């Protein structure tokens, strides 16, 4: 059974755009822009996107199309020594499925938005405490609002209605990770619905994915435009926009600004996660992957920038309504999505409509990012075991078992202590340091083992355009150095995880976190060691052979590895590796793939 391909080019474009444009574009980039010098932040962001984000995206996209393989077999063919890259990515991808719980939160809020009175606007509900304060109350002052804060949780004597809805109704938060408590069955039902949605989006492969993305990739842009137009027409909107873009050139001298810009590039472009490689592998060999990569990267960055106008215009309106400064309403991440924005829409006319629009947008943004990650896992297993997995209904059965097991394990996330489990997995399971290690290994595999010149030749053969000379130097020098520097900074500056309430996690939780972090990164040296042990010859010969691409066909005299992963053979002539290599004329690797 042959490997699938995209039915139409636009299905690939929409799938890739849907994967790249996710929750981080809406709830992380605008906050980082405000925090790190306003419009000045665009300079380090664009520089690092050009030197790391775009080169890595192009490299992964082109490799997928070039090899026509999933994440594991792609790196196995390209550089057997670094075959562990694919397995490291699989571990990170497995951890990243926890973000489905964010969609469950969004679905819970969406269903709550159909009430005649939004439940997070009043203090007359069963879950409210005596200290609950409605922020829309006439006697609410700037000082009171500032005391309540805008974080996930509040240490103030009083707490807002929207905060109590988040903590006491949605999460039913316990005192810490040691107190998991009972399962929140309503939230669990939302979580199950999200898993089912992801399963049916990809269960038939690109045939189903290619149709789903017409909705999941396009609809968020429709909602974003609606929220942008509405936000810019609200009173106080321009105060928020000015606050978003107000330049502070002194911030450019701070190293942390550049580190956060690089981190945002990695997260928003989705590099070092295997999905770009996977989606690109379903293209035809003659697709212009070079032009596609450049346009998709531009679209992603532009979406982040425009989303900032929608977010900050609404936050400016919220600040004006409350009579407070922007500092008191600006938030990032879940604090923006589940506290600040619900409060903002409650102040608008017909708040239910705007709440529905916002949470549908969040669900769509997250859905195609998550199911693209599941497709990465499914395609990698299918390509690793094509004889078994490409039989009728094998893929569907594998995905059903994987999703069911993942759901059952992740029920911990919807317990009373689930938010602490989520924070632990989020901080350690797929943290930035792990992805930086993977990206560094990818650059070594392509820039040095496979060869940057050969990569440029492959792109030219497929697209008809030779990449800019900058990409060659990025793959070999600039991008790996940036990854290494960021990794060192991350390691030196990292601090133990604490909850938003300031809760210190127990020692066993930190130990478990480091096990999760190392479980992905160690795949690279472990597989390298295993392949070296399986290969015959001296250490120098083994390394020389394992750093070469695997060819499906080979003639006698050239040592290479078979497609099925059999041990590396010595030259048939019995001579040395150098003699065999010199005696064999160079061959076009692309034809062998």
Image (cartoon, grey):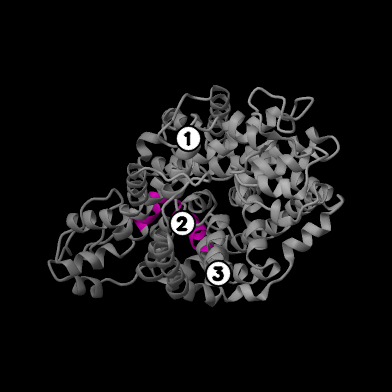
Q: How many badges with numbers are in the image?
A: 3
Dot label at residue 175 = 1
The residue at 23%/74% (across/down) is: 583
The span from disc 2 to disc 1 (Cα, nearest Å) is 28 Å
Residue 3 place in picture, x, y as percent: 47, 43
Q: Quadrant of the N terminus?
A: top left
Asked whether the viewer can see residue 11, the reply is no
Above or below — where is 134 with respect to 462? above
- SS class, disc 3: helix
- SS class, disc 2: helix
Dividing the picture into quadrants, the one containing residue 176 is top left
Circle 2 packing at 10 Å, graded few (<14), some (14-19), many (20+), is: some
Dot label at residue 432 = 2
Dividing the picture into quadrants, the one containing residue 305 is bottom right
Residue 477 place in picture, x, y as percent: 43, 75
Q: Which residue is mark 3?
A: 258
36 with respect to 226 (left or right): left
**Numbered range of the magenta stretch:** 58-77
The span from disc 2 to disc 3 (Cα, nearest Å) is 14 Å
Above or below — where is 578 with respect to 182? below
Give the mark nearer the N terminus: 2 vs 1. 1
**Residue mark closest to the camera, 1 vs 3:** 1
- SS class, disc 1: loop
**Residue mark closest to the camera, 2 vs 1:** 1
* For the residues bearing labels 1 and 3, Cβ distance under 8 angstroms: no
The residue at 59%/61% (across/down) is: 293
The residue at 58%/76% (across/down) is: 253
Dividing the picture into quadrants, the one containing residue 262 is bottom right
Give the mark nearer the N terminus: 1 vs 3. 1
Q: Which of the two residues, 400 or 157, is positioned nearer the viewer here?
A: 157
Circle 3 packing at 10 Å, graded few (<14), some (14-19), many (20+), is: many
Q: Is residue 296 magenta?
A: no
């Amino acid at each position: 059974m042959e490997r699938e391909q995209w039915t139409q080019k636009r299905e690939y474009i929409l799938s890739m755009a849907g994967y790249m444009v996710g929750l981080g574009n809406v709830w992380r980039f605008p906050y980082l822009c405000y925090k790190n010098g306003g419009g000045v932040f665009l300079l380090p962001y664009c520089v690092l996107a050009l030197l790391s984000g775009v080169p890595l995206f192009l490299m992964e996209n082109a490799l997928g199309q070039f090899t026509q393989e999933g994440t594991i077999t792609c790196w196995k063919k390209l550089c057997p020594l670094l075959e562990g890259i694919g397995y490291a990515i699989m571990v990170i991808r497995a951890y990243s499925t926890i973000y489905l719980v964010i969609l469950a939160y969004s679905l819970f809020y969406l269903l709550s938005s159909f009430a005649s009175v939004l439940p997070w606007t009043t203090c007359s509900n069963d879950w409210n405490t005596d200290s609950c304060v409605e922020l829309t109350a006439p006697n609410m002052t700037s000082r009171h609002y500032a005391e309540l804060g805008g974080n996930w949780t509040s240490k103030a004597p009083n707490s807002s209605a929207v905060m109590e809805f988040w903590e006491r109704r949605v999460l039913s938060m316990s005192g810490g990770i040691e107190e998991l408590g009972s399962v929140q069955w309503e939230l669990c039902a939302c979580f199950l619905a999200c898993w089912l949605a992801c399963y049916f989006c990809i269960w038939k492969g690109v045939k189903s994915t290619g149709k789903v993305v017409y909705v999941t990739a396009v609809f968020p842009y429709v909602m974003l435009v609606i929220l942008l137009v509405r936000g810019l027409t609200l009173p106080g909107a321009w105060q928020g926009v000015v606050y978003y873009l107000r330049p502070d050139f002194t911030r450019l001298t701070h190293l942390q600004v550049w580190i956060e810009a690089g981190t945002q590039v990695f997260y928003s472009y989705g590099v070092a996660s295997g999905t770009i490689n996977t989606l690109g592998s379903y293209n035809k060999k003659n697709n212009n992957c070079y032009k596609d990569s450049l346009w998709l990267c531009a679209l992603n960055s532009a979406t982040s920038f425009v989303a900032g106008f929608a977010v900050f215009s609404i936050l400016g309106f919220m600040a004006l309504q409350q009579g407070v400064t922007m500092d008191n309403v600006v938030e990032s991440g879940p604090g923006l999505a589940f506290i600040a924005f619900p409060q903002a829409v409650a102040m608008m006319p017909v708040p239910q409509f705007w709440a529905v629009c916002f949470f549908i947008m969040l669900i769509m943004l997250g859905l195609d990012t998550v199911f693209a990650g599941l497709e990465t896992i499914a395609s990698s297993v299918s390509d690793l075991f094509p004889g078994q997995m490409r039989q009728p209904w094998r893929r569907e059965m594998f995905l059903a078992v994987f999703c069911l097991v993942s759901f059952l394990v992740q029920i911990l996330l919807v317990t009373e202590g689930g938010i602490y489990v989520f924070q632990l997995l989020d901080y350690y399971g797929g943290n930035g340091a792990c992805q930086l290690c993977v990206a560094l290994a990818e650059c070594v595999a392509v820039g040095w083992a496979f060869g940057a010149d050969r990569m440029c030749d492959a792109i030219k053969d497929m697209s008809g355009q030779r990449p800019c000379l900058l990409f060659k130097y990025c793959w070999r020098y600039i991008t790996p150095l940036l990854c290494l520097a960021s990794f060192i900074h991350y390691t030196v500056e990292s601090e133990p995880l604490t909850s938003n309430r300031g809760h210190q996690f127990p020692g066993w939780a930190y130990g478990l976190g480091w096990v999760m972090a190392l479980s992905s990164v160690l795949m690279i040296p472990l597989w390298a060691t295993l392949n070296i042990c399986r290969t015959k010859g001296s250490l120098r010969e083994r390394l020389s052979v394992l750093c070469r691409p695997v060819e499906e066909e080979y003639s006698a005299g050239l040592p290479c590895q078979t497609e099925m992963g059999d041990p590396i053979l010595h030259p048939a002539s019995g001579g040395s590796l150098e003699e065999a290599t010199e005696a064999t004329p160079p061959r076009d690797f692309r034809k062998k793939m």
